[in-house]
Amino acid sequence: MGDSNQKSGMSRRNFIKGLGGGIAGATAIAAKTGKAAQEGPHGAMVVGAGPVKISLLINSKKHELTVDPRTTLLDALRNDLDYTGTKRVCNKGQCGACTVILNGKTILACSMLALDADGASVETIEGLAQGNKLHPLQEAFVKHDAMQCGFCTPGFIMSCVSLLRENNQPTLDEIKNGVAGNLCRCGTYPNIFKAVEDAATTIKKGG
Amino acid sequence: MTGWKKLNDMTYLGKSYTRVDGPDKVTGRAKYTYDLKFPGMLYGRILRSPHPHAKIISIDASRVVNMPGVKAVLTDIKDEVFFVGDDVAAVAAETEEIANEALLRFKVEYQVLPFTVREEQAMLDDAPKVFSNRDNNIGSTQDRTEGDVEKGFQEADVVVEQTYHINVQVHNPLEVHGCIVKWQDDELYMWDSTQAVHGERSAMARHFKIPENKVHVISHHMGGGFGSKLGMKSFHIICANLAKKAAVPVKLMLDREEQFLAVGNRPSSIQKIKIGAKKDGTLTAFQLDSFGTAGIGGGAGVPQPYIYQFPNYKVNHKDVFINAGAGAPMRAPGHPQANFAMESIMDELAEKLGMDPLELRIKNDPNKTRQQEYLIGAKQFGWDKRLKSGSQKGKIVKGMGLGSGRWSGGGNRETKANVNIYPDGAVDVKIGTQDIGTGARTIVAAVVAEELELDLKDVLPLIGKSDYPWAPASGGSTTTPSISPTVKLAAEKAKNSLIVRVADEWKVTPDQVIYSKKTFTSKDGAQSLSWQEACELLRAPISEMEKWNEGLSDSGTAGCQFVEVEVDKETGHVKVTRMIGVHDCGLVVNMLTTKNQIQGGMIGEIGYVTMENRLLDADTGIMPNADMENYKIPGALEMPDFNITMFDESERGVIGVGEPPAIPGVGAIANAIANAIGAHFYETPITPDKVLMAIQGKEGKS
Ligand code: FES
Ligand code: FES
């Protein structure tokens, strides 16, 4: 079981780190809020619940925002900004609907704190198409009807973008592994596989 | 009114074309209820009961009301809770984070009451009562008899008797339930992830005692429902009350755990079945004693005897209340449960009779369509290569199984649609249906384009609002057979109105005007106008309303599926490797989306039979697996190869296919596993532990 498990594993570690019992997180908040981190019970570092200023480079566009330290990257994208293409489904790193690409790697945006993404470059579903020209994967998802309700679709596409960047000629098994961390309740998997195969061919041809 | 054109003469119907909102869905532009934001909008959250049954003695919200950012609090929702996850109190705050924190600050005093979360226990005389005002925990009951069962069993040469336990499944649409409510003066606007904009409108109007035309329900895109979003639920009311109190819009989206606990599930079913047949396989009698639970709701009955013809039968069923969230319709309510038990016992019977399972079904299935489908499916599948159950050696063994299904469906005669043609040539169609992922929006546009001989992109489909003409809830495979005929008739009427206008212009009678492929010509060939030019003759838009009518759709479907599995005898792991579905789909409005929908139904079956199980802890009433890691649904790695045949009966008109594909594979998968290892299964889901136990049990016996 490839990629996807690593993906969620990685982001869960980030999540734990980000939850900010962690000293690093606390110090970061302290630096941003101008409040000193203090030692709390059991020796943990705690900070006031003040808002935190961060900046994110989203689809090459710079955003400065102030977030609640508890806000996940997902909620910052969706609620604080308006990148609602990234979906919240389980909010626990179990479904892949919130997959975005952070500094070149897929992560689960629900499982990372926004302040941990400070300064990062984030690619979301909204950044794939060039104006009206769809990305070959988007084109192929439409053509093969790789969606029904469409709520899982952005997450799948982002996982596939990353898969094709790493491996532009994936086998069926590699595709399945590449999206093994994404869930679709409508049951569009077979069409997704076809779409990815098709898009891989298009991309290879330089489309 | 004219009928559908011949299949060969149609541009869209019967063909494949991509969905009109595809580009919106793949770019993230499609806005679901979950994605909407309004100025000043608050976030609502519900405090839920940690107890399976308790009286609420008091709720102290003093530490909530004075929290900065909290704008509305509800503490008078109810005074008794009936399951873990039941509503207790609610809050609306400026951010989700604040709302979540507020939930931790309520202090609730409960008087904990006795409870029960096991059907068997709940049925006992001394069981704790779920509802104190009832004598016991038995809800509605069914008794159905045909012929003389005793006589039927006397005539039988072989009798099989078994009990099947089918567990609870949870819908798990990816977009969890939720809505945004905004009051504007005395009118209520509700953006809702719903399968029924009109149903919600009526229900909200009734609840809040306001006229229906002051309630506006909107569902532009929605992330799946599978039956769990067919009606108003308590969170709708809570959200509206919060919004009223705060006097600003409130968004209340449930989270995944709440979805597992509080907004519906497919009821359990425990079926004790006795079945009899003659030596030649002719079925003689069927007897069922069943019970099941839909938690504090009802509807756990099963349509037995399913599919096969029994001259004599007796069915007895009881709904049992337990302290769990209420059930809700889920893709083909009751049918998968019936299918699992019936197909399982039919295979056991076939084995006893020394008969091929397919032959036994062909012998006893009265449905002519399915008779043909069996042969088509068996041939495609290679049923003749099925090996004797349990005859394979080695670590990985293969198995084959088959199952059947039926569904009624059909169009709703109250459906209405409105087609508009504008002086600039634009066309739109308004109908208060909703697209739950099936492609209804695309169907609406395609049917109008077909009738007006325009391109799909020339028709604007306007759906998902209760302010549009009435259409039924999207459930029970009724949507396509309701909306397609209605929209066609409205488009036909609008086209005729335009023809009349052209005839007027030419000073001829309408029958002298021929319309074809965006061009109007006079019969004598002297005059001609393009679509555009004809529309420019209009001084005001043509706006025609029509109602559903017979003759363009049908109800009643038959289907069967064949399944191949591989079982790892060392780990008990089951891999479904191939699924073949043969389903009659009438006139298929869109091949591409229909096939997708059928495949989706079949994938749901894999989850139901091999993975999904709503667990409830008997000591606490808690669901320990209320998330997507511990409650598994099928993923990419579970996908078999699919082959789908849409049995061609286009002359029947349009029929729905939401439910039919979610049935036959249930028993087929179970039987394929049984065929592989040579032992039958009596409980779902058939997880590796159960497979290993079955293998052990068999080896112990031999
Ligand atoms: S919402 Fe992030 S993995 Fe499910
Ligand atoms: S398309 Fe509905 S969940 Fe995937």
Image (cartoon, coloured by chain):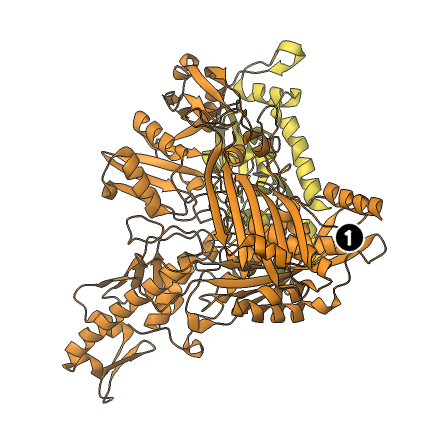
Chain colours: A yellow, B orange
Reading the image, the residue beneath label 1 is B677
Name the residue at 23% across, 34% down. B186
**In the drawing, does residue A158 fall left or right of residue B36?**
right
For disc 1, the chain is: B
Image position of B503 (left or right of B642): left
Q: Give the residue drawn at x 44%, y 41%.
A: B35
Q: Residue at x 56, y 53 (%)?
A: B149
Query: Looking at the image, which is closer to me, B436 or B498?
Result: B436
B682, above or below A134, in the image: above
Residue type marked 1: Ile
Determine if residue B298 is in view. no
Name the foreground residue: A103 vs B321. B321
Label 1 Cα neighbours within 10 Å, binned few <14 / some 14-19 / many ≥20: many
State whether residue B221 is above or below residue B351.
above
Q: In x, y percent, where is residue A138? A: 54, 56
In this rendering, is residue A189 above or below B300?
below
Q: Can residue B366 be seen in the rendering of this structure?
A: yes
Q: Residue at x 23, y 44 (%)?
A: B213
On the rendered structure, is B128 left or right of B518? right
- Residue B199 sits in which quadrant? top left
In this figure, what is the number of numbered marks?
1
Q: Secondary structure at mark 1?
A: helix
At which x and y percent is residue B119?
57, 34
In the image, residue B481 above or below residue B467: below
Residue B682 horizontal/vertical position (percent)? 67, 45
Q: Nearer the viewer, residue B698 or B474?
A: B698
Q: Quadrant of residue B343?
A: bottom right
Image quadrant for the C terminus of chain A? Answer: bottom right
